[in-house]
Amino acid sequence: MRYTTLLRVITPPMGTLAVIVLLMLIDSAAALVQPWLAGQVTGTLLGTDTSGLSVLLLAWLGLAASKSLLTFFSGYLVGATGEEMSARLRTRIYEHLQILPMDYFHGRQQGETLALLTRDAEIIAYFITSTLVQLLPLMITFFGAFIMMALIDPLIAGLTLLLMPLYYLAMKLIGRGIRPLSTDWVNAWSKMYAFAEENLGMLAAIKAFTRETFESGRFARKNETLRRLSTRQLRIQSALTSSVAFLATAGLLLLVWLGARQMQQGALDAAELVSLLLYAMLMTRPISGLAGVYGEVQRTRGAAERLLDCFARRPEPDSTSQRGLAVAGGAIVFEDVSFAYAGRAPAVRDIRLEIAAGETVGIIGPNGAGKSTLAWLLMRFAEPDRGRILIDGMDISGVSLHSLRGQIGLVPQHTLLLNASVAENIAYGLPDAKMSAIRAAAVAARADDFIQALPEAYDTLIGDQGVRLSGGQRQRISLARTLLKDPPIIVLDEATSMFDPQGEKDFLAECADILAGKTVLMITHRPVALSIADRVVELHDGQIAY
Ligand SMILES: Nc1ncnc2c1ncn2[C@@H]1O[C@H](COP(=O)(O)OP(=O)(O)OP(=O)(O)O)[C@@H](O)[C@H]1O
Ligand SMILES: [Mg+2]
């Protein structure tokens, strides 16, 4: 079941992979001809008639040329397919991340998700295109070489086969540490990535509290852990390859000794011995190849686990499967709604609240009272544990998210902006909006004046999260973005908390026009903002205080 999920997510290009395997198989077969040719050449050289030598050498040259071509094509295909697969996997993961519910992201570090998107996607794609497709050709080389040896001298071939368990045992013994190590390595890598990601986002706080040295030290320790793990992995991998190489040479020498004995007894001639030795050498290639595969399998396991973990989370319901919400008036009813964030006490309890169409309701209450949670539930960023929410009499749990969110404008408490121009930020919900409409929204949000003063006015780039703007300016752009969307229901979550008093007053004075006919939830700590509310509701500890 997990493998089918994995296959469904990765969707390897089977056709291309089959071509790669085929090319590699031909390459393996060509490799099997070379020792035979070498034997023939030896035989001709030792014989009296050397007339066939040039034909043999020409044949060998032709074989080498075809092998080069094959190597080129399969190498290129492996690389290109790997790139294509990791690109496709990244897109697939990204699409899935976009439709996962918000609590998925609240339960983990962002760096972990980024590591999945970058590192893990690459590891998995690489494993399939480079490691997995090699398996069959390696086997063919191994058994092909064995069969050819058996044709020349069954006794020696049999003895060689008997050595194999020894090789396997050595490989397993030396390589057993690789698996836990590679899991640790990827974990350490994700941790370091996550750490840097978070840290760089809070540099101003780090500087303000003069914690630079402390944070650099923390990063250095994570980096050091990663280096130590890499070194240990390298040590094992090197030990593995060098011991396999030594064992292979030892095996070969044993073969020479056995072959020499067979020759003395007349059971083998020089040409056959040369072929035999070269076949034995060919057999060592798959053996060390398998040692590499072993390490890769362990590394990929961890990445696949994390991928499955992400895809095991159910996405938000698909919009096409549910009916659309058509807001007429915009009356909202919270019907005994309770909700708790995972592992927390309820954030809101038994909320019973009826908001008439076109009404502006102020929502107040201390920090943590559950005000933003009400907006969270109305947007269906999470579903209530109990009770239901109705808009114009329709239970929102049964309507498509697209239609629901399309008709509610939320100005969130924490402003979220893109690293793009002012105009692009305002038009985020309506990418086709005309410049005149964007400007009108900015004027309504009291943002036009300061935007005009920016170096490139509406085309000014504002930096990550709008870092090149003041807090109040960011908030005004966020407000303009929602006003441009012009939805029938508006939720203002502390939307003017950073406005200067005059700006807030100006905005509120015009609110009657701007918000006319809309249902408005005005979450605020500011008494002045309440002046436009028809009614004020107070929350305390997740409950409505009467
Ligand atoms: N993502 C979350 N995961 C877990 N608990 C949360 C989460 N977001 C909020 N909470 C908790 O839920 C409770 C209600 O939070 P909420 O954000 O609704 O408060 P609020 O009334 O908007 O406060 P404020 O005035 O500070 O904005 C708080 O106790 C808070 O700690
Ligand atoms: Mg809040």
Image: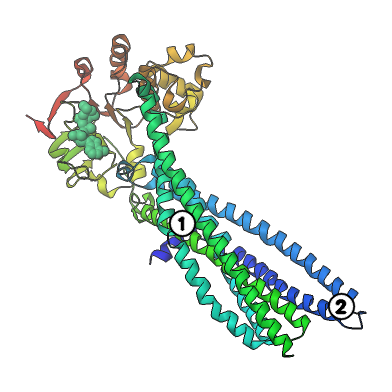
Q: Dividing the image into 4 quarters, which one contains the C terminus?
A: top left
Q: Is residue 112 left or right of residue 144?
A: left
Q: Which residue is mark 2?
A: 45
Q: Are marks 2 and 1 in contact (CB under 8 Å)?
A: no
Question: Who's the residue at 71% across and 82% down the image?
Answer: 260
Q: Is residue 128 visible?
A: yes
Upstream in sequence: badge 2 or badge 1 = 2
Lateral position of residue 455 relative to residue 254, left or right: left
Question: Which quadrant of the rendered structure holds the N terminus?
Answer: bottom left
- 10 Å neighbourhood of mark 1: few (<14), some, or many (≥20)? many
Quadrant assignment, res 528: top left
| Residue at position x 31%, y 9% in the image | 502
Q: Position of residue 377 (x, y in %)?
A: 24, 40
Which mark's residue is nearer the viewer, 2 or 1? 2
Decide: is 147 above or below 221. Answer: below
- Residue 5's place in the image compared with 370, above or below, is below
Q: Position of residue 168 (x, y in %)?
A: 50, 71
Farthest-out residue, left: 546
Q: Which residue is mark 1?
A: 299
Q: Residue furthest top?
A: 502
Find numbered disc 1 in the image and state the secondary structure of the residue it sits on: helix
Ligand 2 positioned in quadrant: top left
